[in-house]
Amino acid sequence: MEKDPLRGNASIPMSFPASYQAVGDQLENGQQIRSVSLSSDDDMIDITTTGTTTEHSIHGEEQGSHLTSIKYSGHLGGGVQFIGLQVSGDSDDIPGIGQYDDFHTIDWQRDIARDRMRHRYIIKKKQDSICDLIKGAHDAWSGWVCVLFVGLVTGVVAGVIDIGASWMSDLKYGICPEAFWLNREQCCWSSNETTFDNGNCSQWWTWPEVLRQSREGVGPYIISYLVYIVWALIFAALAAALVRMFAPYACGSGIPEIKTILSGFIIRGYLGKWTLIIKSVGIMLSVSAGLSLGKEGPMVHIACCIGNILSYLFPKYGRNEAKKREILSAAAAAGVSVAFGSPIGGVLFSLEEVSYYFPLKTLWRSFFCALVAAFILRSINPFGNEHSVLFYVEYNKPWIFFELVPFVALGIMGGVVATIFIKANLYWCRYRKVSKLGQYPVTEVLVIAVITAVIAYPNPYTRMNTSQLIFLLFSQCGVSNSDNLCDYNRNFTDVNSAIEKAAAGPGVYKAVWLLVLALIFKLVATIFTFGFKAPCGLFIPSLCLGAIMGRIVGIGMEQLAYNYPHIWLFSGECSTGDDCITPGLYAMVGAAAVLGGVTRMTVSLVVIMFELTGGVRYIVPLMAAAMASKWVGDALGRQGIYDAHIELNGYPFLDSKEEFAHTSLAADVMQPKHSEPLSVLTQDSMTVDDVEILLKETEHNGFPVVVSRESQYLVGFVLRRDLNLAIANAKRTLEGICGQSLVLFVNSVPPQASGPPPLKLKKILDMAPITMTDQTPMETVVDMFRKLGLRQTLVTHNGRLLGVITKKDVLRHVKQMDNEDPNSVLFN
């Protein structure tokens, strides 16, 4: 650092933001202090008087990168008392520096460097006092405390949502007159009856009974039908209206946006308190309306809102966007953990599907956060059973080796169904964007709700809650199961005896037909539902489609084994008379296949599925189906549903999974092209007016700083936002700064400078911008943007600045190379 002499009582800003006052410039023996200079590199102070030069070591306090205060008093040579030197630095940064505007990309490298510097300062201070030691300890454990709070709050919110959604869903069928706040299952707990007709008991009144009608018959059926439609309309209208009025960002599933935010994009308000409240209430209403959607995807969004809000209690995370993303990754894991009762699946989901930057400590914190959230949800016990698992299965039969063939076939079918769904849903969402339909979001939700309710009610499998249907399809036919699906010609003499093989009765064939109709209806309804302007998730509808498909295949296999037990396929396993094929297992495998095809998850999907059902024995069938569906899905269409929606909305997301296989160079992509001028700042020859004109005429997010326009040698890079804030702050606080003041990005004032005092802005200059030469292959450039999370990089040739490549330029180039519309990248 250059030594900056300070004469007399002058107060001159130095290279770091500090003003120096030499107290006692006239010394006792008449000598005068000629110069005082400070080297912050080695904490040395040099004091030169008219008589002697003495060097004294001094102690300075450093905060961040600025010297804040140095006090010294001591004896100079010749017995002369030097009274003191005080240095007071403006440790307060310019307000707003280091923050980002809406719809901008964060600079990972800068944020991580700022955090390291802050950390080093805390470590250095720890030895000074007990108070600083406690501060250091608080800083070390604040990450764990933050994820603990996130886990606690997420568990509680999830419990409230589960209880509220199940109560409101049952409200469509009837009410519990003794205690209206109980849902149907809780209402029937106190009943002494052993069998319930369609799940109803005498304590639970259906709406016809409330209106003094009988339970069965044509009149009551019509009343039930109409009440069902009215409730569905009320719930859907409320959900859509709340989203429209209070939190437009609360619509949809939220996972595509969470992926984009975690990759380093800022969407202000997307994780705010209003979005949290409206999404939580809205998802209860949407699910209760009987629409073809789930509450599991939105749980991830809700958990990330909680993570974002709680991170502001810890400035280490609240003020640093890159650090905040570590908390958001852990929150996403907690979201899946409470949605499915699957903590390990949640951590893997966060790692595989949503997170962009996932260091090892984030893995541990995500694990802890998911664990706490699952524990809290289990304590609340919203499902009212001893399992915190959604669809717990009781069977534990081994599967036959030959069954891998139908399992893989289910995987292939799942991939095909998923591709049909993705392509149709994208077509509909595109149409919604460009047509007038997009102007009437609430009307669209209401129309879909009415059509869904009218078509769903007559079919018992579409009328019931989707989660209940999946549970029914997963479960095994036993003594207590009275559904048509279990209408086999069996005699249960002993409750504990093994279930024997049996011919399917007429009820099973009827159920299969109804399931086929339910499959078609659910597929079409989900295509129109996903992406509309109310909270809606995709996990449960996908699982439902797959479970229906799997159960039908399972019943077919079961009847094959019953009619031909001795063929070599079943290798003698089915000749004993016991039931050797479990249709519920096929439903599980089918569910995994469709969900895998739609989202393209693999590892996390298998773990979620076996945590969800408790079927650890069936990992291999689930893996086979998940792989088959992913391969088929990848062959038929490049993207999963979330990546497709990211692209549809034009978010600046550089997918780390995709390869860049083209041979272009950095020079082909950089802005400006060779013939156009480059907007730059010079280090010491532009005035405040010149800089403000440049800011007005251009829209760039930042400017390279060069030695001079002629040489174009690079000095550093300064952000537009920081430049605006620094100039506004200087005009407000510093005297004499006017349009003619020189703007300096160096320590020394140029010798020719005269006129008003200069404005020194070296502290907002990034002295180490990432640079590359114009001959760098784009493959390397794309890799650097992905792995370092860059905002921009500067392109040089022989050390001279040529141009800039921003993340947006990279995304446009990738689209152009893939023969897509490069202007579909909407945001900065």
Image: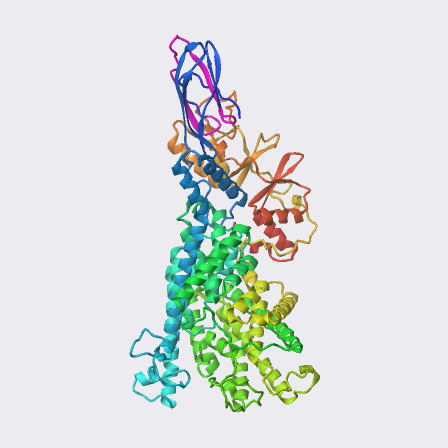
Horizontal and vertical percent position of residue 813: 62, 51
User: Relative to the observer, which residue lies in front, 441 or 549?
Assistant: 549
Image quadrant of residue 193? bottom left
Q: Look at 54% across and 75% down and name the residue there.
A: 545
| 33 within the magenta span | yes
Q: Is residue 94 magenta?
A: no
- Image coords of residue 283 (percent x, y): 42, 66
Q: Is residue 102 left or right of residue 585?
A: left
Where is residue 583? Give x, y as percent.
57, 80
In magenta, the rendered stretch is 14-43
The residue at 59%/42% (across/down) is 793
Query: Is residue 22 depicted above or below 589 in this figure?
Result: above
- Asked if 682 appears above or below 178 in the picture, the reply is above
Q: Is residue 332 above or below residue 395?
A: above
Relative to 89, residue 793 above or below:
below
Residue 266 appears in the figure = no
Q: Is residue 502 visible?
A: yes
- Viewer-closest of 747 and 691: 747
**Residue 702 coordinates in the image, percent (x, y):** 52, 40
- Looking at the picture, tell me which residue is in the foreground, 223 or 294: 294
